[in-house]
Each structure stands twice: as structure tokens, then as C-alpha cells.
Image (cartoon, grey):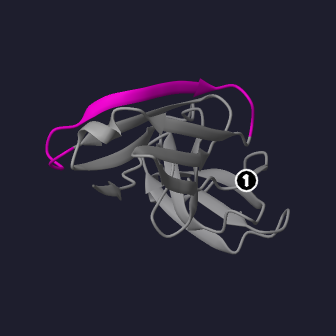
């Protein structure tokens, strides 16, 4: 039997590194046309700037999941006038890591890390076209490890897996 792990993670991770998704309230100033995000690895020192347009959320990816990042937001009005920095926020990027893949007596065992307040769904396919949910869980505890045993894997000559995070 051949088993494949394909990690197609929706919304919370990138292939290269961790990511942080952030949101903010819309400005009450009608002349605001866009927002900027500034961030860096020390408080008050923002070495990166991203212009995100006229949206109230964004995801910053390709971040090192072992480093604490600090963020502020500004609004940009007509003519390019930029507001003062918002209050600073900080966080570690999240990176989905598969910590174990084992075939034990024909049953596929999959382990991966998780963060609190997320739903995780494991889907399986035999052809990479049609996918079905085989496991869903909500995690309440931060930095847990999810261990899943696919008891039906023994019934398939090959099976692919993907993990979704909502």
C-alpha cells in the first residue's frame, strides 16, 4: 500500500514559513483610501512595511515561527497622508507541522501540532480529485498535538491526505 501526505492548509500557514493573520477596525475618516502594516522583531522597531489597500485584514506570511513579531497599522488618506501608528500588537507566527507519519499494521497514523481556537479537518482522497472529511476536531488548548489514526486506510491501495485549518 502507498500512502501520501499532502498538506494543503487553508488560511493559517504557508509552505515556506509561519504566518500571522490580523484585522483592524475601519477608520471613521471618510478620506482613508488604504492601510499600511509595519512590523519587526523588536518592540517599536518596525523594519518592514506592507501596503494592503482598502481592506481591514491581511495575512503576512514567510515569517519565522520561532520569532516574536511586533505590528502596528496606519491609515492612509487621499493625498498619501498617513496616520500615527496604532497600538502595537505582537505574536508568534503559526506554522502547521506534521510531527509524525507512521503506518502501523496498515493503519495510517498522522500527528501534527495545533493552536487553540481552531478547527482542524483531515480529508482523504484516492485520486487527488475527490476529497472526503475523515476527521474534524476543535482545539481548545494552545500548542496541542493532534494524533489521528485512519482505521479505514487498510481498505485502500493508496490514499492521500490533506489538513485544513479554519
Residue 14, x across and y down, in percent: 47, 60
Left/right of residue 14 with respect to residue 70 in the rendered view: left
Q: Residues within 10 Å of mark 1 (few under 14, many from 20)?
A: some
Task: Identify the residue shown where x is 76% and y is 66%.
Answer: 67
Asked whether residue 130 appears in the rendered view, the answer is: yes
Q: Position of residue 145 (x, y in %)?
A: 67, 42
Q: Quadrant of the N terminus?
A: bottom left
Q: Secondary structure at mark 1?
A: loop
| The magenta segment | 126-142
Q: Quadrant of residue 64?
A: bottom right
Residue under the image location 46 percent in, 55 percent down: 52
**Is 19 displayed left or right of 164 in the figure?**
right
The answer to whether 17 appears left or right of 52 in the picture is: right
Q: Nearer the viewer, residue 94 or 85?
A: 94
Q: Which residue is mark 1?
A: 85
Looking at this view, name the residue that lies furthest to the right: 43
Q: How many numbered discs?
A: 1
Residue at left 70%, top 25%?
140
**The magenta stretch spans residue 135:** yes
Q: Position of residue 9 (x, y in %)?
A: 42, 48
Vertical placement of 59 versus 64: above or below? Answer: above
Residue 89 drawn above or below residue 150: below
Residue at (58% x, 24% y) in the render: 138
Amino acid at each position: 500500500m502507498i500512502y501520501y501526505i499532502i498538506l494543503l492548509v487553508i488560511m493559517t500557514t504557508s509552505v515556506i514559513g509561519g504566518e500571522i493573520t490580523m484585522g483592524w477596525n475601519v477608520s471613521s475618516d471618510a478620506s482613508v483610501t488604504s492601510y499600511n502594516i509595519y512590523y519587526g522583531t523588536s518592540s517599536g522597531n518596525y523594519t518592514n512595511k506592507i501596503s494592503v489597500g482598502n481592506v481591514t485584514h491581511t495575512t503576512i506570511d514567510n515569517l519565522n515561527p520561532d520569532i516574536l513579531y511586533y505590528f502596528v497599522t496606519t491609515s492612509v488618506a487621499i493625498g498619501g497622508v498617513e496616520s500615527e501608528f496604532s497600538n502595537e500588537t505582537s505574536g508568534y507566527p503559526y506554522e502547521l507541522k506534521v510531527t509524525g507519519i507512521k503506518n502501523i499494521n496498515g493503519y495510517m497514523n498522522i500527528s501534527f501540532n495545533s493552536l487553540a481556537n481552531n478547527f482542524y479537518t483531515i480529508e482523504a482522497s484516492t485520486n487527488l480529485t475527490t476529497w472526503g472529511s475523515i476527521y474534524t476536531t476543535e482545539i481548545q488548548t494552545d500548542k496541542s498535538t493532534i494524533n489521528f489514526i485512519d482505521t479505514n486506510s487498510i481498505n485502500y491501495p493508496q490514499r492521500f491526505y490533506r489538513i485544513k485549518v479554519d
